[in-house]
Image (spheres, rainbow, N blue to C red):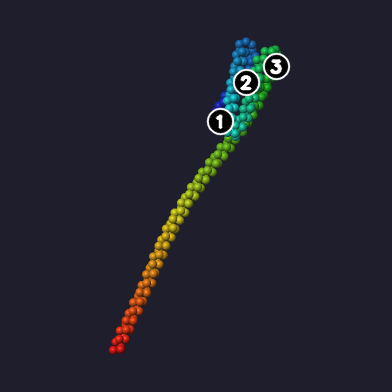
Amino acid sequence: MSLVFERYERQYCELSANLSKKCTSPNALDDGEQKKQKLSDIKSGVEEAEALVKKMDLEARSLPPNVKSSLLVKLREYKSDLNNFKTEVKRITSGNLNATARDELLEAGRADTLTASADQRSRLMMSTERLGRSTDRVKDSRRTMLETEEIGVSILQDLHGQRQSLLRAHETLHAVDDNVGKSKKILTAMTRRMNRNKWTIGAIITVLVLAIILILYFKLTR
């Protein structure tokens, strides 16, 4: 909930309680300066309460929809309570009623106001409790989301580390493959040299054998 809205709401509740006391005071209809002063105080309080309701309405409509809906429900209760005060002021200030009728109307209005205010306060408390539970659920959901995000980040870090390990292993295998290729080339060259050496030695031996045969031939024929 908005802190600004809560501040306005707290001011309105205090002002509403003060107006209820003034409207239900036994001297609310006394004649003379005391009555005028009390009526003036009540009217000023009603105007101030109306201004607070308007401020709360503006603040509530600027909030996100999930918070705004619950606050507008509370505002309807406050507006109804404010209308009761306005009606009470009209009854008090009415100069066409005689004293008896005025007292009866005041008592009836006083009872209605008290009943309505008590009922409205009960509904407001229930609405506040429901809003508090909703806020707790939102906080729990946000905490779960943050925990899930942390787990996801940890998993991504682990996957990144495994990817780096695989890349290093791939590089190592590539280097080994290069070394095997070089070794294979060296062995092939050595095999070719050995084959050439074999043929060279064979040729030399053949030449020596032929030379020996010729020498023996010439010696035996003489």
| CA gap, disc 1 and disc 2 | 27 Å
Mark closer to the observer (3, 1): 1
For mark 1, what is the residue? 2
For mark 3, what is the residue? 104
Residue at image point 40% right, 67% down: 188
Residue at image point 64% right, 15% down: 28
Three-letter code, disc 3: Glu
| CA gap, disc 3 and disc 1 | 42 Å
For mark 2, what is the residue? 20
Mark closer to the observer (1, 2): 1
Q: Secondary structure at mark 1?
A: loop
Whether residue 106 appears in this view of the structure is yes
Mark 3 burial class by Cα count in 10 Å: few <14, some 14-19, many 20+: few
Q: Which one is earlier in the sequence, the residue at label 1 or at label 2?
A: 1
| CA gap, disc 2 and disc 3 | 18 Å
Q: Which one is earlier in the sequence, the residue at label 2 or at label 3?
A: 2
Q: Position of residue 201 (x, y in %)?
A: 35, 75
Q: Quadrant of the N terminus?
A: top right
